[in-house]
């Protein structure tokens, strides 16, 4: 079975996000004062072949913990869907 995983990596709460602050300031300048607490993260799409769903979940979690997210300053979540 083949799976598509989408990993979302974001700065942890309380961690300074200078890029998010710059975007927030720019949005205010453009006339969007209602925007608050902008956080910039990254999305990583992975395709996994020939593994079970349980194995895919375990492997993606390992990838996040070992490489894709810095556990000290970043959080991650992910979804796994059947690849089409």
Image: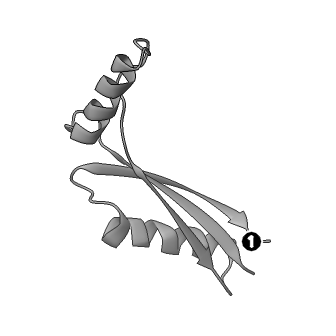
Residue at 57 percent across and 67 percent down: it is 57
Relative image position of residue 50 (x, y in whole percent):
68, 87
Residue at 33 percent across and 27 percent down: it is 26
Which of the two residues, 62 or 11, is positioned nearer the viewer here? 11
Residue at 33 percent across and 71 percent down: it is 67
Task: From the image, tell me which residue sits under label 1.
Answer: 83
Above or below: residue 51 compared with residue 38: below
Relative image position of residue 19 (x, y in whole percent):
27, 41
Farthest bottom residue? 50
Q: Residues within 10 Å of mark 1 (few under 14, many from 20)?
A: few
Farthest right residue? 84
Q: Answer yes or no: is residue 17 visible.
A: no
Relative image position of residue 36 (x, y in whole percent):
37, 20
Q: Is residue 17 left or right of residue 24?
A: left
- As helix, strand or loop, the secondary structure at mark 1 comes to loop
Q: Is residue 81 left or right of residue 35?
A: right
Which of the two residues, 72 or 22, is positioned nearer the viewer here? 22
Q: Quadrant of residue 14?
A: top left
Which of the two residues, 33 or 82, is positioned nearer the viewer here? 33
Q: Answer yes or no: is residue 73 visible.
A: yes
Relative image position of residue 63 (x, y in whole percent):
41, 72
Q: Is residue 20 left or right of residue 7?
A: left
Residue at 30 percent across and 50 percent down: it is 74
Q: Quadrant of the C terminus?
A: bottom right
Above or below: residue 54 compared with residue 18: below
Q: Quadrant of the N terminus?
A: bottom right
């Amino acid at each position: 079975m083949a799976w598509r995983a989408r990993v979302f990596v974001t700065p942890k709460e309380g961690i300074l996000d200078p890029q998010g602050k710059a975007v927030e300031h720019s949005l205010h300048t453009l006339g969007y004062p209602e925007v608050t607490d902008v956080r910039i993260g990254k999305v990583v799409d992975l395709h996994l072949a020939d593994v079970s769903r349980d194995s895919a979940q375990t492997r993606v979690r390992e990838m996040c913990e070992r490489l894709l997210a810095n556990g000290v300053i970043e959080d991650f979540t992910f979804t796994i869907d059947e690849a089409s």
